[in-house]
Amino acid sequence: MLTIICGEDVPASRDYYHQLKKQYRAKLYQTVEVDYQEVKSLIADHQSHRSLFFAQTAYFSQNVNKYISVRNNPGFVDLLKTIAADPELILIDWEENKAGREIKLRNAGTIKEFRPARSVFQLLDSCFPGNTKAFLTLFHQLLQTSEETFIFAMLARHVRALLLAKHQLFAKQTPPWQKHKLLHQTRLWTTDRLLTFYHGLYRIDLSVKTSRNPLGVGRSLDILACSCL
């Protein structure tokens, strides 16, 4: 059995991954962390991991998707399909910040995808000068149900996409409707003001990661929005 946990809501997907581990332990399963090389030998080693004190073993891996390639690594693909078809062999894989459509083996295993709430995208759409009140209202509503670090990461990625769109640059997988939406939103920004906002986000990110931000992400974003939107 192969279960792949993914989604752009990384805190939620990560929490689900750890909750599954706790659930299996509560059922007296032995939980074993395995990396890519260990996954490759999982079928052969499965019997050796059995214990007299545990009912069964559940294996947990991370970011296996990057090794999946039918062209360059067909043996590994076949192995994962074999694991997916075996109900007694349990493999739980967590993919960091991967949407379900990006999972290459999505037709073999079970996909558990954690998508951002619709309100997150409403917040991104409301991020433009002259719309401070609406932006902050949505932001504080979101803080009731989502982690501030997740909201911040989504906003930073969106503003970076807006900067690229200003120069007609888009990721290869960007659909036409999303390009149109980004281009429309960039018209609400001057390049200088968008750069100022992006640099402000960068400074918040850096100060948090270096433990030099006494205000926290939420309050810092409040201040930045009031000065740039």
Image (tube, helix red, strand yellow):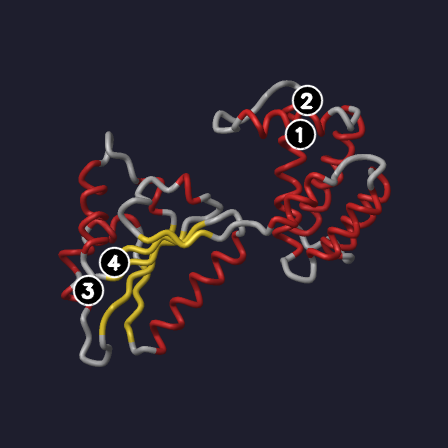
What is the distance, in whole Å, between disc 1 and disc 4 at their CAs?
41 Å
Q: Earlier in the sequence, mark 1 or mark 4?
A: 4
Q: Classify 173 as above or below 2.
A: above
What is the distance, in whole Å, between disc 2 and disc 4 at their CAs?
45 Å
Please name the amino acid that badge 2 sits on. Lys
Which label is found at residue 88? 3
Quick one: SS at disc 3? Answer: loop
What is the distance, in whole Å, between disc 2 and disc 1 at their CAs?
6 Å
Please name the amino acid that badge 4 sits on. Met
Q: Earlier in the sequence, mark 2 or mark 3?
A: 3
Q: Disc 1 vs disc 3: Cβ atoms closer than 8 Å?
A: no
Q: Quadrant of the C terminus?
A: top right
Quick one: SS at disc 1? Answer: helix
Please name the amino acid that badge 3 sits on. Glu
Q: Image check: 37 left or right of 125?
A: left
Q: Earlier in the sequence, mark 4 or mark 3?
A: 4
Residue highlighted by disc 1: 162
Q: Position of residue 181 (x, y in %)?
A: 64, 29
**Label 1 packing within 10 angstroms: few (<14), some (14-19), many (20+):** many
Residue highlighted by disc 4: 1
Q: Earlier in the sequence, mark 1 or mark 3?
A: 3
Q: Disc 2 vs disc 4: Cβ atoms closer than 8 Å?
A: no
Quick one: SS at disc 4? Answer: loop
Residue highlighted by disc 2: 166
Please name the amino acid that badge 1 sits on. Leu
Q: Image check: 129 left or right of 105?
A: right
Of 29 and 41, nearer the camera is 29
Residue drawn at x 16%, y 56% is: 43
Q: Quadrant of the N terminus?
A: bottom left
Q: Image check: 229 left or right of 11?
A: right
